């Protein structure tokens, strides 16, 4: 099969492209390069530069490249930014998806994998979040992902398109240093940045109802996440007309304080964190139940948190050589 991977020049997308190639699939990358990096795309993989809002270009790409399946990762994804720019997020994430699905169905593409997020759950008051946990998103970003799931599911039911919505938890790590996340929006790179600036890492609130008072999250290695995409894609191929929604996580919670301690130990820095006030909307605990994907698709994460920190640090040092200690 030939898979069109939107956002394939991004951090997660580049890993999905490589996982697809390693599995023997053909890939075409479609990316507007607003945050993606062209050099992440392998030389033998076609790169089409454009927005998913450009229906004509999308349709032409699907036809000319003989695309048989789509993995849709292209989206705006910063929670805070979405609070300030909700119209922009709905246009890019929901209208962009509608345009893409319109082109996909017209071209009679058979399979569609949608990049969703644990942000659809909001602040779940449960120990483990299952796919049946009520979705009450707390940001326009989370709302657009939930609306996207609805749109994907409805399109599949109406047209026979095989669809999967994958709800990512906290993604970290890298397959190799050159594929590392260059953004500083998630906990691990935020801690790296503070340490290498000779500043203490920050904890946003230490009075949560958790064992050490800090927020608890489920982290998933980006390599595991990419392989989950391949597993889902092949499941859709094997079962035409299927439609499923799955959590992608490890089912293991790690607190913010524990993560900072691990990063300090691995990097050789010994800089205790400082506590600042809570951020609005941060739930105390969000940890996935990954039972459904294990049962239905026989997939399970292979890498642990230490692997994530180690590989992410290698990528950080590649970009910031002076950060290395010793």
Image (cartoon, rainbow, N blue to C red):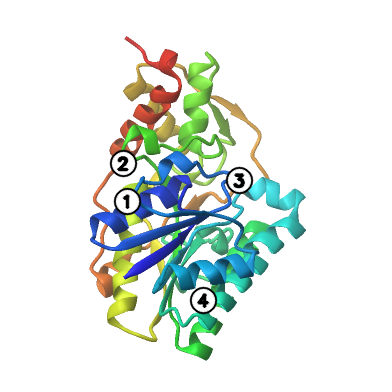
Mark count: 4
Asked whether residue 251 appears in the rendered view, the answer is no
Tags 4 and 3 touching, CB below 8 Å: no
**Labels 4 and 2: the sequence-earlier one:** 4
Rounded to the nearest whole Å, what is the CA distance between mark 4 and mark 2? 30 Å
Q: Considering only order in the chain, which callout, 1 or 4, is on the residue closer to the N terminus?
A: 1
Q: Residue 19 vs residue 171: left or right?
A: left
Give the quadrant of the C terminus. top left
Q: Is residue 136 above or below residue 211?
A: below
CA gap between label 1 and label 2 equals 9 Å
Q: Earlier in the sequence, mark 1 or mark 2?
A: 1
- Mark 1 — residue? 18
Position of residue 85 in the picture relative to residue 37 (left or right): right
Q: Position of residue 143 (x, y in %)?
A: 64, 64
- Residue at 54% across, 34% down: 184
Tell me if label 4 and label 1 are in contact, CB under 8 Å.
Answer: no
191 up-or-down from 90: above or below: above
Q: Which is nearer the N-term, disc 2 or disc 3? A: 3
Q: Which residue is mark 3?
A: 34
Residue labelled with disc 4: 104
- Residue at point 35% right, 67% down? 2
**Which of label 1 and label 2 is nearer to you?**
1
User: Which residue is label 2 attached to?
Assistant: 175
Q: Are dots 1 and 2 in contact, CB under 8 Å? A: yes
Label 3 SS = loop
Marks 4/3: CA–CA distance? 23 Å
């Amino acid at each position: 099969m030939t898979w069109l991977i939107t956002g394939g020049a991004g951090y997660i997308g580049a890993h999905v492209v490589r996982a697809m190639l390693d599995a023997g699939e053909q890939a075409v990358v479609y990316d507007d390069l607003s945050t993606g990096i062209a050099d992440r795309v392998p030389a033998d993989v076609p790169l089409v530069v454009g927005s998913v809002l450009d229906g004509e270009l999308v349709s032409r790409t699907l036809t000319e490249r003989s695309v048989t399946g789509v993995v849709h990762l292209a989206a705006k994804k910063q929670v805070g930014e979405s609070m300030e720019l909700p119209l922009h997020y709905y246009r890019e994430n929901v209208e962009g998806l509608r345009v893409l699905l319109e082109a996909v169905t017209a071209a009679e593409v058979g399979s569609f994998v949608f990049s969703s997020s644990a942000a659809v759950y909001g602040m779940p008051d449960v120990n483990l979040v299952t796919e049946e946990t009520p979705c009450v998103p707390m940001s326009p970003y989370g709302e657009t992902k939930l609306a996207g799931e609805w749109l994907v599911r409805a399109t599949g039911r109406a047209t026979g398109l095989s669809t999967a919505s994958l709800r990512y938890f906290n993604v970290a790590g890298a397959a190799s240093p050159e594929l590392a996340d260059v953004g500083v929006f998630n906990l691990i790179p935020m801690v790296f940045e503070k340490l290498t600036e000779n500043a203490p890492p920050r904890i946003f609130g230490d009075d949560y109802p958790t064992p050490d008072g800090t927020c608890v999250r489920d982290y998933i290695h980006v390599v595991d996440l990419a392989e989950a995409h391949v597993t889902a894609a092949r499941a859709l191929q094997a079962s035409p007309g299927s439609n499923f929604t799955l959590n992608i996580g490890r089912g293991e919670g790690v607190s913010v304080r524990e993560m900072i301690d691990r990063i300090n130990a691995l990097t050789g820095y010994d800089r205790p964190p400082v506590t600042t006030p809570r951020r609005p909307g941060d739930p105390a605990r969000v940890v996935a139940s990954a039972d459904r994907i294990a049962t239905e698709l026989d997939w399970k994460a292979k890498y642990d948190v230490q692997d994530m920190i180690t590989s992410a640090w290698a990528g950080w040092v590649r970009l910031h050589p002076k950060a290395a200690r010793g």
